[in-house]
Amino acid sequence: MNKVNDIKKYIRENILELTPYSTARDECGDNLNINIFLDANENPYDNGLNRYPDPYQKELKGIVSQIKGTPEEMIFLGNGSDEAIDLIFRIFCEPRVERVVTIKPSYGMYKVAAQINCVECVEVGLDDEFNLCADKILSSVTPDTKVILLCSPNNPSGNLLSEKETIRIVETFDGIVVIDEAYIDFADRDGFLPQLDRFKNLIILQTFSKAWGLAGLRIGMAFACKEIIDCMNSVKYPYNINCASQKIAIEQLTTLREKKKSELKEIIFERKKLVEELGKISCIERIYPSDSNFILVRCSSDATDLYNYLIENEGVIVRNRSQVFGCENCLRISIGTPAENEKLIKLLKDYLTA
Ligand SMILES: *Cc1c(COP(=O)(O)O)cnc(C)c1O
């Protein structure tokens, strides 16, 4: 158990002093029996979109709470998890003064959000197998380090980070630890959500963009203690998730759960098949183990040449990660439909004879 009991000491002073914008919807309350809304300068004629959205997405959050088994007061919903990442910088890190530590290679948005917010981002390399070493991370921490950002399963390497090393970081670090679990639904191990109650300094990020197939809706989730969630809610734009997104998300999460489950199963099955098939292809030198919906492969010839070949021949695009730390000569391949994967394999087989 991390000894943190007052999360306030990590929050920037101007944020602690903030009087958040109070919307018309905040002031009208939940319990009152109001049916004529003359408080928000909306157009009164109903077209399904004339009213402002619920700033706290209560109905959607109720469903998320039920799916995840986490109380609503510990859930933040944002315009993608990218919104949550940006808010974390703005809430905890004093520009030009404080720093964050993250791993490399990892998701590019951490560094971009750090740069936008004028916060130094120290990147600590994973080892050759993309494993996390808690000591290495903790030894990069200085008194100015406010946040450590981890990603598990990690993008672009695809692997889960060691649970033991991660917990050691959360327990030891005197600051906020973020674990980005965008791909956790594809892993065969639980993420850290069931352990959230143990750690007040932990923020878990998840998203509807990957396993749930809703990247176009832009809805991400952050899970943390109530104090952190309250703070995120007071800093976010009041109406950060629009009516259409909330409505469609509610429909999708309630009616399509079985469909999503079977898609997820199919993607995991295809991942296994793809790993086997890629193993037989001579232009692929190494296949990294994946707990996500993509596979990182190291090419035996020039990765960029193979990348261009795939685009030029059948218009297949993968992610060229060959310029990224630890990913020299590597491509990251998302799992497609069975037909798409088959086409990819055929193309790769042809490449070696080309
Ligand atoms: C794709 C991805 C996200 C998703 O971001 P959204 O803004 O929710 O679409 C977050 N983190 C990682 C590591 C990702 O790869």
Image: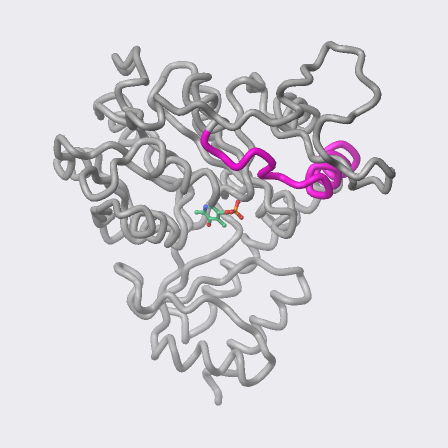
Write down the quadrant of residue 136 in the picture: top left
User: In the image, which residues are magenta?
Assistant: 235-256
Q: Residue drawn 42% across and 17% down?
A: 227
Q: Residue drawn 47% across and 68% down?
A: 280
Can you give x and y, in whole percent of width and height, for residue 61 in the image?
63, 26
Residue 130 vs residue 149, the one in the foreground: 149
Q: Is residue 126 above or below residue 54?
A: below
**Residue 213 lies in magenta, yes or no?**
no
Which residue reaches farthest bottom? Answer: 354
Can you give x and y, in whole percent of width and height, for residue 338 in the image?
66, 61
Write down the quadrant of residue 63 in the picture: top right
Can you give x and y, in whole percent of width and height, for residue 219 in the image?
59, 41
Q: How would you classify the magenta stretch by its main secondary structure? A: helix
Q: Residue drawn 26% across and 40% down?
A: 132
Residue 67 visible from this viewpoint: no
Residue 118 visible from this viewpoint: yes
Q: In this view, does 351 lie to the left or right of 209?
A: left
